[in-house]
Amino acid sequence: MIAITVSLLVAYSFPRTWGAWEKNMAPILISNTSSSLSPSRSFKIERDRFVINGRPIILKAGCMHYSRVPRAYWNDRLMRIRAMGLNTVSTYVPWNFHEKSEGSYNFGGQKDLKEFIRLAQENSLLVILRPGPYICAEWDFGGLPGWLVKEGATALRTDAEPFISHAMRWWRTILALVRPQLYSNGGPIVMVQVENEYGFYGNVQENPSDRRYMQKLISTAKEILGYQIVLFTTDFGYEKFLKRGSFPGGSIYTVGDTCKKPGVTFRAQHGMNERGKSPNMCSEIYTGWMTRWGEDSTMHVTAKDLAQRVEDLLKRNSSFALYMAHGGSNFGFWSGAAGTNATDFQPMITSYDYSAPIAENGHHGVDINKEDKFIALRRVLERHWNPVSDGSSRIPAEPDHIQSTALFKGKSVKLSRKASLLAPSTISALSGGRMQSSGPIARNLAMEKFGCYYGLALYSARLPALRSGSKLTFPSGPRDRAQVFIDGRLQGVVYRTDTNYTLALGPGARESDRIDILVENKGRINFAHGMDEQLKGLPFGVLLNDEVFLPKGNGWEVTCLPLHSKDLSGIPFPEQETSTGSNSTILFEGPSFFWTTVTVPEGRKDSFIDMEGWGKGYVWVNSNPLGRYWTEKGPQNCLYVPAPFLDGNVWLAESPMLFAVEENPHPQIEVLVLELDRPNFDLSVRFASELSKGGDDLLKIGNNSNNSQAHDDQAIG
């Protein structure tokens, strides 16, 4: 056996592979005695510092969620995070994204977490992994699967069945998956978070079930990952929340977020952590904030204030994570909601731009004053760049921006085919012909009870005998938005935030008429005890004239309409084009799909589809779900259309091979819109160009600079 001592000092330009990073990290590996030429790798905490391979390092992280960015753009966005001057990427792992159906895991295609981590490593970024089980993130149910409540409301995020068994199965699965990519095993993962902001929900000091839950997560993580990985918790950066959500001493590293008062946060951290094991760290610095439907402004952090906060932290030798560095989009049905109860319910918009330094489409994010956040941060990070610990002699150059354009030169595209959502042929295509009966008496008609976890649920029955002035009531409100039809005629709409949950049935309603109640799940609450409002659909049943609704016949027929892309292709559209008419005529016909196929002359470029003039619904391009629009509420009218979506169905693809599609210079695309209320009067949509400085022209948002710091006393992320 030969002992070899390696002494190297090498400077490189921007490394494109982790091998180059290793060479750039050579000063950290100055002395190594080993039987192998490959140096040992370690990341640990010593003397209140993070230490990588024997040398101190400050983690300068940017948050990016792979679940919100098309896989084809992962590498581009990671390169931009690196080019901003960061050395680490932080990402959440949404449990429900990978286990949408109980017991069936999906880690392929868009959900290939290991590939995302590999790309981070290739771009010389360390990784902070945040695998839950709960993540918040303004993501549906905070990442918890909807099927957890299929048997009814249940205790969450504590040591109680059935939650704990499901959570521990997930925990073991995800930790085993990523173990080979730990830093000590040759990968980039240096830290793994346990739970998320638990002090806002549980209390390990006072509740034995909460304490056991967190202890089980920690002990299992150590069992599977070993003791070389740094495990940590994060909570709002004050002593009260850290004590509720974590444990004093050395069992886990406790971190604070928000850090409005860094000194207070770091003192609280030091009070929780073992002596010498408490490097200053702010796990979330908010670069912007979330936006909810109906808000008339976004909450901005200015470029100047953000840069100053980062500068102040670096002067304290503090590690940090920008939440968000790049926000992305809530494609499909993944957006969550804020709120605390039935009427305090604020669902998130589709865009998760977050006013981040890297905008939704990958361009530079700017503040209300049109100041460039990306450049402001890069200037600060250049001053604090360390060629030794940051892995290269200088910050790499930013890659060219991906081209974007107003497709069809901004001219309108007519959606010339129409199919009624309530037509039996459409319902059959969307549901596979599957429907369930509630039985003759049903007070709990929650969607989850019937296996409906996302999208829409249709409740159908025959009216019993009616009296004059009959009325329908949703006790405690629907979850979340109910449209009532009798023989296809709209009777009215009830939303959970309304003050009145009663509808008068029209004078034309008769015994044995068909009643349809279409209920939309607008996203589950994702934060604190608002999550206890778990069930969707009609969990409190329906009343007719203040009595339990007893349908004529065998009860309610409940049909799940998850709006899966594979089902949408079966919708039977008529051959003839749909004639346009007044909005009132179209609304009377009820919720409908509108579709067209068209060749794109500009080729494969990013764009935005502008839903101005439409009411409320969903959009797909080539079966890729762009997400929700709700123009009558606002503030978002335009949905991001990434260029890869023009190549085919890549978002939901499970096979990575689909991402190697040959680029068509003039792709033909299908545009599909489900309009629940009223379509544009001429059934057309337009495509817009890239977001301009600030993006407010496309979001239709009027910014309010007085809100710039309004969220600093909260911790959500």
Image: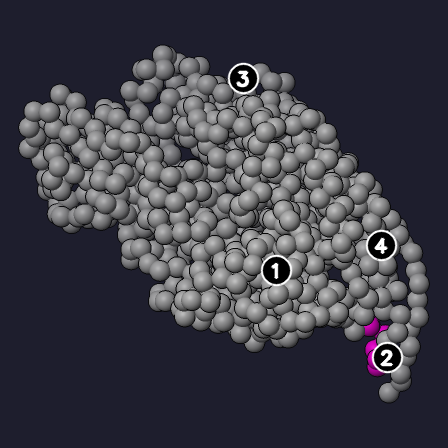
Residue type at numbered disc 3: Ser
Query: What is the number of the mark on residue 268?
Result: 1
Residue type at numbered disc 4: Asn
Residue type at numbered disc 2: Thr
Q: From the image, state whether disc 4 or disc 3 is nearer to you.
A: 4
The one nearer the camera, 494 or 412, is 494
Which span of residues is magenta-colored? 34-39
User: Residue 17: x percent and y percent?
Assistant: 79, 56
Q: Which residue is mark 4?
A: 386
Q: Is residue 67 visible?
A: yes
Query: Mark 4, residues whose alpha carbon is within 10 Å: few (<14), some, or many (≥20)?
Result: some
Query: What is the number of the mark on residue 33?
Result: 2
Marks 2 and 4, the one that precedes in the sequence: 2
- Relative to residue 458, is residue 237 depicted above or below? below
Residue type at numbered disc 1: Ala
Q: Which residue is mark 3?
A: 412
The one nearer the camera, 657 or 32, is 32
Q: From the image, state whether disc 3 or disc 2 is nearer to you.
A: 2
